[in-house]
Image (cartoon, rainbow, N blue to C red):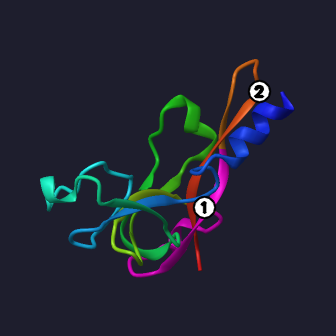
């Protein structure tokens, strides 16, 4: 079990927000893409992995009140569209903030948090969320 957890922790994408950059047009993407949707064939073999800073700003958000059963204990919670400093826009939950303090234009940074556990095996799943800077 120790070897399995070490491999999981050391995986390239664990605990890091990974995207990639097109070597042809220089656009940055998240999640990682095999082909640039702008350059198409010219980007094949030119997509380079990169670690994203996880820093950006809120461009839109909503407060979720009606949740699936697995999220009842978290409600209400904030979901936001976040434009990362590198360019991609992604959806993320805002945590550790009062919902009335969340505003468009506020700066955020990514953090990794426990999302869930796999049944009896107890393998913990982590994912990115965002906190106000």
Would you call the spot at circle 1 few (<14 residues within 10 Å), some (14-19), or many (20 or more)?
some
Can residue 79 be seen here? The reply is no
For disc 1, the marked residue is 95
Magenta span has 39?
Answer: no
| Stretch of the chain drawn in magenta | 96-114
Q: Say which mark, if any, is on residue 111.
A: none
Give residue 31's position: percent from left, percent from top.
Answer: 39, 53
For disc 2, the marked residue is 122
Magenta span has 110?
Answer: yes
Residue drawn at x 46%, y 47% is 65
Using the image as rendered, state which of residue 20 and residue 109 is in the foreground: 20
Residue drawn at x 65%, y 36% is 116
Name the residue at the front extreme. 45
Would you call the spot at circle 2 few (<14 residues within 10 Å), some (14-19), or many (20 or more)?
few
Does residue 114 lie above or below 128 as drawn?
above
Can residue 88 be seen here? The reply is yes
Q: CA distance from mark 1 to mark 2?
A: 24 Å
- Identify the secondary structure beneath mark 2: loop
Residue drawn at x 53%, y 60% is 17
Asked if the residue under mark 2 is in contact with the one under mark 1, i.e. CB atoms within 8 Å, the reply is no
Give residue 11's position: percent from left, percent from top.
Answer: 64, 46
Name the residue at the right extreme. 2
Q: Is residue 126 left or right of residue 23?
A: right
Q: In terms of image quadrants, where is residue 42?
A: bottom left
Q: In terms of image quadrants, where is residue 36?
A: bottom left
Residue drawn at x 43%, y 59% is 19
Does residue 88 lie above or below 55 as drawn?
above
Give residue 15's position: percent from left, percent from top.
Answer: 64, 55
Which mark is first along the chain, 2 or 1? 1
Does residue 27 lie above or below 80 as drawn?
below
Give residue 105's position: percent from left, percent from top.
Answer: 39, 81
Count of residue discs: 2
């Amino acid at each position: 079990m120790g070897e399995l957890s070490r491999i999981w922790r050391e995986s390239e994408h664990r605990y890091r927000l990974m995207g990639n950059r097109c070597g042809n047009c220089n656009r940055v993407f998240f999640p990682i893409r095999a082909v640039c949707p702008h350059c198409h064939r010219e980007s094949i073999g030119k997509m380079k992995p990169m670690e994203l800073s996880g820093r950006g700003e809120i461009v839109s958000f909503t407060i979720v009140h009606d949740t699936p059963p697995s999220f009842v204990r978290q409600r209400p919670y904030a979901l936001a569209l976040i434009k990362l400093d590198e360019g991609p826009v992604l959806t993320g939950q805002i945590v550790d903030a009062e919902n009335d303090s969340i505003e468009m234009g506020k700066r955020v940074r990514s953090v990794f948090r426990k999302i869930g556990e796999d049944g009896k095996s107890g393998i913990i799943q982590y994912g990115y969320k965002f906190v106000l800077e």
